[in-house]
Amino acid sequence: MPRVLTPARLLAAGLVAAAAAAALWLFPTDSYVFLPNRAHAVAPFVDVEGGKDPKDGGGIYYVDVLVRKATLLERIRPSEGATVVPAEDVRPPGVTDSERRREELDEMSRSQRVAAAVALRQLGYKVKAEPRGARIEAVASDAAARGKLEPGDVVVSAGGAEVHTPADLRRAVRKNGTGRAIEVVAKRGAERVTVPVRPRTGPDGAPILGVIVSQDADIELPLDVKIDVNGVGGPSAGLAFALDVMEELGRDVDRGHKVAVTGAIELDGTVGPIGGVKQKTIGVERAGIDVFLVPAGENAAEARRYAHGTRIVPVKTFQQALRALATLPKSAED
């Protein structure tokens, strides 16, 4: 006999369908999702001895990325502006989420001190800073360095040349080329590891290891600089911090404009690449900011793909960023 669909059975079927839909929305997977977040003014989070927040209507803004476990639905069909990535691109195998989070906060702390050192030097202060190597922050899942170098490693030598800064590492890799492996020596805690890594060709045609690095250094500042961005981690706000420190000490860096900034910074002022450019560009647009300073090269090219009306300014160094901002017309609100 045909099965009669009573109201109770229809209700039960509806509840099952609703539960399945909820699971798609809420059930976490092993993947992670990167989501845009609005740009935030840096000044409220920075306190410089003898400095003060500018009142010209402008400001330096940093932009971060929201990262969490992706749901089943997000993995099947990501929302606008979202990017779903495999777990190993966010945290290496064997690393817990809490350990990853702690490392990101340590990265932020280190980038803050480097940023303050760069800014104070630019203003003529004497800063004691000893570079100690290129710290590995992330390793791409398709990189030859995967499984050989780990986040937290500090590279001190590459191809027989000493590495004091990330720029030293990039020079050694470019000199080596892609035809053979380069010997990389890194400090890993109390140990010292030596691994051969064969560079591959990057998007701009230059040899790369497929890692993101930041400056590891011992720094003593002549002024007290405190930066607290409410638990945001990673090194990518370094350039923004350096520009804001100068603003708070009286240098009119933004010329009355709201300027969004992203980019890691090294002791010599070099601006290094960062991740999450797509989401950061969208976050800048949502905040209504017209100018976005981005590391030159692949980062700037990606930002332009998602910029709809936002002016993308590629920069390679802190000094170049200052020169680019100096060309902005003085804001009428100033």
Image (cartoon, rainbow, N blue to C red):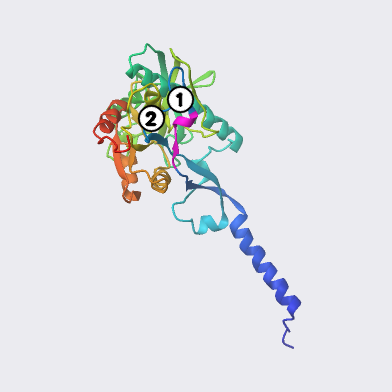
Q: Is residue 213 shown above or below 74? A: above
Please state the extent of the stretch shown in magenta in the rendering: 39-45
Q: Residue at x 57, y 31 (%)?
A: 102
Whole-percent x and y of residue 104?
52, 32
Q: Residue at x 61, y 55 (%)?
A: 26
Which residue is denoted by mark 2 in the rendering?
239
Q: Are marks 1 and 2 in contact (CB under 8 Å)?
A: no
Q: Amino acid at mark 1?
A: Gln
Which residue is denoted by mark 1 in the rendering?
112
Residue 28 in view in this figure:
yes
Kindly indicate the quadrant of the structure image that contains residue 41.
top left
Callout 1: SS: helix
Taking depth in this image into account, of 50 and 187 the one nearest to the observer is: 50
* 256 displayed left or right of 287: left
Q: Is residue 93 shown above or below 217? A: below
Kindly indicate the quadrant of the structure image that contains residue 211.
top left
As drawn, the label of residue 305 is: none
Taking depth in this image into account, of 255 and 27 the one nearest to the observer is: 255
Callout 2: SS: helix
Residue 164 in view in this figure:
no
The quadrant the N terminus occupies is: bottom right
Within 10 Å of disc 2 (Cα), the crowding (few <14, some 14-19, many 20+) is many
Residue projecting furthest to the front: 333
Q: Is residue 323 shown above or below 132? A: below
Q: Is residue 44 highlighted in magenta?
A: yes
Whole-percent x and y of residue 299?
34, 40
